[in-house]
Amino acid sequence: MGLSRFAPALRAIDTVTDAAGRFAGLLAITLVALSCALVVARYALGLGSVAAQEGVLWLHAALFLLGLAYALRHGAHVRVDVFSQRWTPRTRARVELAGMLLLLLPLCVFMIAMSWEYVGASWATREGSRDSGGLPGVYLLKSLLPLSAALLMLQALAETLRAARAALSGETK
C-alpha cells in the first residue's frame, strides 16, 4: 500500500508526541523534587502549603495526560502478549488495526466531545482552586483533557496507518 506519501505527516506526529513525552519526563522529575521538598518542609520544618500539595496533584495529572500518546508510540501501553506472541506479524497488525479503529480512535473522539464544554465552562469562569491558598488557573489543568485526547488521537492515526501497512504487507511496523 502506498503509505509512503504519509511519511512526512507520520514523522511530524511522532515529533510532536516525542516532545510531549519529553515534557512529561520533565514533569516527572519536577514531581519527585516537589514531593521530596514537601516531605522535608512538613516533617523537618513543620511547614505546609496547600498550593504545593495541589502542585503535586497537577503535575501528576499532567504527567499522565501528556504521556499517553508517548506510551502508545513507544509500545509502553498495555497489551495482551499472552495471545499475540504466537501470532504472525500480519495477524498482530490486523488486531492492532482493529483495536485502533474500533476502540482507541472512538475513545479519543468521545473524550474530546465530553470534555469540550467542561473545559469551556472552566475557562469562562477562570476557575481556580476551591481551597484557600490553592492554585489559581484550574482551567489550564482541565485544558489538558481534550489536548491529551487530541495528541493520543494523532498518534493513534499514525499507528493505524503503520498497522494498515503491516497488515497488508505482512511486515512489522
Image (cartoon, rainbow, N blue to C red):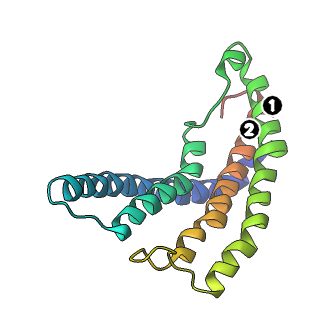
User: Splitting the image into 4 quarters, where does residue 115 fall?
Assistant: bottom right
> Given contact means CB atoms under 8 Å apart, are the residues at marks 1 and 2 in contact?
yes
The residue shown at (79%, 30%) is 95
Amino acid of disc 2: Ala
The residue shown at (70%, 28%) is 171
Q: Residue 86, position in %: x, y?
A: 71, 12
- CA–CA distance in space, label 1 to label 2: 7 Å
Question: Looking at the picture, does residue 86 appear above or below residue 114?
Answer: above
Relative placement, left or right, of 156 versus 36 is right
Looking at the rendered structure, which numbered label has been put on residue 163? Answer: 2
User: Splitting the image into 4 quarters, where does residue 31 fall?
Assistant: bottom left
Question: Looking at the picture, does residue 71 appear above or below residue 19?
Answer: above
Quick one: quadrant of the C terminus? top right
How dense is the environment of label 2, judged by Cα within 10 Å: few (below 14), some, or many (20 and up)? many
Instruction: Name the residue that disc number 1 marks.
Output: 94
Q: Residue 67, position in %: x, y?
A: 52, 51
Q: Residue 81, position in %: x, y?
A: 65, 21
Relative placement, left or right, of 103 versus 75 is right
Q: Residue 169, position in %: x, y?
A: 77, 30
The residue shown at (82%, 45%) is 101
Relative placement, left or right, of 147 versus 88 is left
Question: Looking at the picture, does residue 30 appear above or below residue 4?
Answer: below
Question: Looking at the picture, does residue 75 appear above or below residue 47?
Answer: above
